[in-house]
Amino acid sequence: MSSIIMYLEDKYPQHPLLPTDIHKRAINFQVASIVSSSIQPLHNLNLLKYIEEKVGPDEKLPWVQSVIRKGFTGEIKLTCSPVGFERG
């Protein structure tokens, strides 16, 4: 996801997606990383089948929900920080 954002930033600099402040840019990349590495993969059917094999069908949904909740909790902490989340 970050590479797409970087491509669009370079291709269309007149329409920035990211803030100019380096700290705020870093937070944007952190949020994108949380989504792409911990939240989004849990929507993959193969991964969900694997998790079900490991924890059982009754535990799969609660396990996945807890991991997604942790990801969103991390995002909320980042976006509500004093530096904050914003786009360009």
Image (spheres, grey):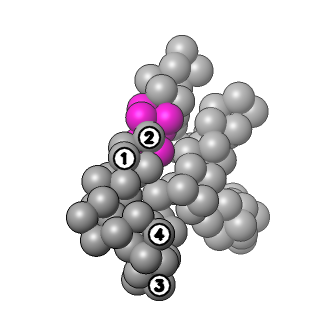
**Which comes before the other along the chain, label 4 or label 2?**
4
Label 4 vs label 2, nearer the camera: 4
For mark 1, give the secondary structure.
helix
Number of numbered markers: 4
- The picture places residue 64, in percent across and down from the top left corner, at 37, 58
- Which image quadrant for residue 31? top right
- The picture places residue 12, in percent across and down from the top left corner, at 66, 66
- The picture places residue 67, in percent across and down from the top left corner, at 43, 49
Circle 4 sits on which residue? 54
Determine crowd level at label 2: few under 14, some 14-19, many 20+ residues with C-alpha closer than 10 A: some
Left or right of residue 21, residue 59 in this image: left
Q: Residue furthest bottom?
A: 46
Q: Amino acid at mark 3?
A: Asn
Label 1 vs label 4, nearer the camera: 4
Magenta residues, start to end: 71-76
Residue in view at x 28 percent, y 71 percent:
57
Please say whether residue 41 is visible from this viewpoint: yes
Residue in view at x 49 percent, y 35 percent:
74
Circle 2 sits on which residue? 70
**Which comes before the other along the chain, label 3 or label 4?**
3
Circle 1 sits on which residue? 66
For mark 2, give the secondary structure.
helix
**Which comes before the other along the chain, label 3 or label 1?**
3
Q: Amino acid at mark 4?
A: Lys
Q: CA distance from mark 3 to mark 1?
A: 19 Å
